[in-house]
Image: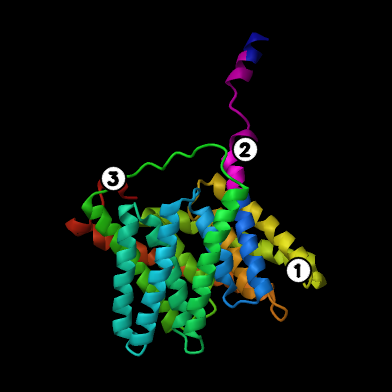
Amino acid sequence: MCIKKRLARSRPPSMAATKRKPELSKNGLRQCLRVAGGGTLGFIVSQLMGWNYGVFFTVFPMFLLGMVPVLNGHIIRQFLANVSINVLEVSLVVGLLKHMPVVMTLVVLGIFLFRFNLMAKGPLFLFGANGVLTLSILLHFASYPNVDLSDLLASNLVASGLAVFIAMLMHTLFPDVEARQPPPRASKTSSQIRHETLIGGLTATLSFVVFQVFDLQGSLSAQMATILVLFTLGYSGAKVSAAKRAVGTLLGCNLALLMQLLLYTQSHHFLLVVLLYWLGLMLFAREHIHEGGGSGIGFGGLTTLGILFGQSLGPQQDLVYSALYRFSSMSVALTLTLLTMACLHVVLNRWTPTRLPVSNRP
């Protein structure tokens, strides 16, 4: 009997117990409610008002509430300042340089390098990250001749202002119950900052060029995926992020298809659509919090649902084709992005001023 008791004590826990995810903390649950509520409210407002570019209204609140667990004056100023600068940049780049693609590409490269340099240094990471993401979306739309540039920029301004209002409302309704500790600030060498700046700026610019050359106007989700994996600021982190992003997009597409099957002929009932959309956002928000934030499975599913419902939901549109096309295009785009980053990673590490420290290499 003693031997059996000792063996029982020394026996490792079951696989189910080791793989079971911890319960959400009180702050984590509040952030889930903020992300799901904010994304749903943005979707409701854009649909009721009949505004164009619904993807802005669904994704921006998710980004502001999901990527940043707190809200203060510094964060709001970064977000709104980025919006104002984005409008000016896109107006000048597209309005003045659209007929000179080479010059336009060089200017876009300079803008992306500036944003990734801010991200690599750290204190203005949100300003840089939001700038890269928003610029990619705006340039993607604005470069096509059938797009009304003033309508595009106005929608971006309204969506950004609405996202800040929604974030403030969600933090008021679901405030944190415990004080959050600020994340530790990592110290980086000058060569590491240059490496992260160049690999992010060059890859983002190549993504922009490819989507223009091949006229991939309907592949916004794929282009967003290539940008979001760059937020890890390096090839080693991008490999992990890309795999999670692919899984999140696949789950988001499948959930959107399941929702359409459940709705079937009742998709005109807006309250049913909103309810299912909120439930889907809550599911992915929970996964996002468990992953500790960042662009992983949870955030991939959140943005996929936001894009599908914000851009592809309408009386004459079908989510089935949109979901299938979105996942296939995203898979190809992520594969090409990782190949590009791998090549840049090797080249930059051959030059001393852009070489990563040994501890940061994959």
The range drawn in magenta is: 6-32
Which tag, 1 or 3, sits closer to the chain's start?
3
* Image-quadrant location for residue 125: bottom left
* Distance from Cα at disc 2 to Cα at disc 3: 32 Å
Query: As displayed, is residue 66 above or below residue 47?
Result: above
Mark 1 in CB contact with mark 3 (< 8 angstroms): no
Give residue 270's mark.
1
Q: Is residue 148 magenta?
A: no
Disc 1 packing (10 Å; few <14; some 14–19; many ≥20): few
For badge 3, the amino acid type reads Ser
Residue placed most toward the observer, 80 or 118: 80
Q: Which callout, 1 or 3, points to the residue nearer the camera?
A: 1
For badge 1, the amino acid type reads Phe
Chief secondary structure of the magenta portion: helix
Q: Position of residue 142 (x, y in %)?
A: 45, 81
Query: In this image, 106 relative to 293: left or right?
Result: left
For badge 2, the amino acid type reads Glu
